[in-house]
Amino acid sequence: MDVTERESRSAGPASVPGSTPPPIGPTRTVATRDGRTLAYLEVGDPRGPLVIHNHGGPSSRLEARLLASSAARNRLRLVCVDRPGIGQSSPQEGRTYSGWADDMTTIADALAHQEFGVTGWSEGGPWALAAAAYIDPLRLRHVSSIAGGSYGAFGDNWGASHLSKADALGGFLALHFEPGFRLMYAALGITAEHFRRTYIEQLRKAVNDHDRQVLLQPELATAFCEASAECFAHGSAGLVRDAELLYRHWPFDVTAIERPVHLWQGMDDRLVPPVINKTVAERMPGAVWHPVEGAGHFVAIDSVDEWLGVAAAELGARPATPSALPD
């Protein structure tokens, strides 16, 4: 089927609405049926519709801080959950996409929401698409993948020819030499935890000019580094398993997803080339394609009001009054 497309604005100057992240709130946990613990951070309106956000990689539940002001403006109750083995969530043997869909439903149940939405940025994007594949659409009322790492959608590391040399190497190691893949992520963890200036400078070199301007905002860069470092609170094993599943041929078929799924993409993304998610959009019957001209991988941050606004509309969030909006 043809891709359903909605035009999105071109990326303008990289000033992020509410770019000073609020203080970190308390980490809360949910117990799963098999005895694991899932840690999450909640932001936004506690009375609003629920959005479960899937963080990128390396990242963690602390990514919610980057979305907090927009979640409040859009009257959404947004929770960002550490995936198994990441941050403060328990590890899980035999991780699967369907299993994580069950975990997201468990979170919604624990928070007393029958209906909810799911979003995901970067490495979190595939987990949002899995929600669309596995969760009853009568419960799951909105799905967005923002610059998702859709590398296993059509086969093992199918998009390798479009990736940077470093990411293509990572995919090769994930599929063919796991010890090397683990070593690569362990080194990344050391840098994120102990050499944050180096970590952010390396990232600035890898992205486009628009993304660099986003990362030059000190408070935002600090919050991003903290979210990345927290990913490795218990080592790199959780992220390694996360990424392995990302690169391997997914067990669900995106060409069979007919419910609406929003795909947001910066068209100058140097980390996840646009052709990857454009191909997913072209082959997914329910895709709603949102290209943002000039934006890079941090389209999730500088277009946050747009994609959370769509989530709010589909979930029926009450519009905020001007006096209730955060500065």
Image (cartoon, rainbow, N blue to C red):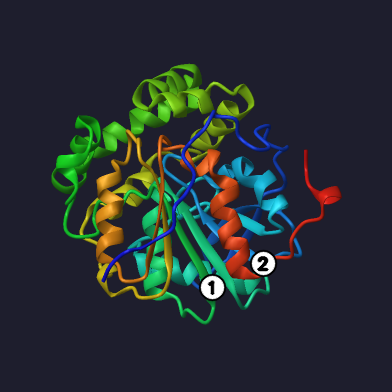
| In the rendered image, the vertical position of residue 301 relative to residue 85, given as above or below | above
Query: Amino acid type of disc 1?
Result: Arg
**Residue under label 1:** 141
- Report, in whole angstroms, how far the alpha carbon at label 1 lies from the one at label 2: 10 Å
Q: Badge 1, how many Cα within 10 Å: few under 14, some, many 20+?
A: many
**Residue under label 2:** 49
Q: Mark 1 and mark 2 in contact? Answer it, CB < 8 Å.
A: yes
Q: Which mark is residue 280?
A: none
- The secondary structure type at the circle numbered 2 is loop
Q: Position of residue 310 (x, y in %)?
A: 56, 60
Residue 152 location, quadrant: bottom left
| In the rendered image, the vertical position of residue 187 relative to residue 51, given as above or below | above
Q: Position of residue 309 (x, y in %)?
A: 60, 56
- The secondary structure type at the circle numbered 1 is strand
Residue 324 appears in the picture as rendered: yes
| In the rendered image, the vertical position of residue 214 relative to residue 25, given as above or below | above
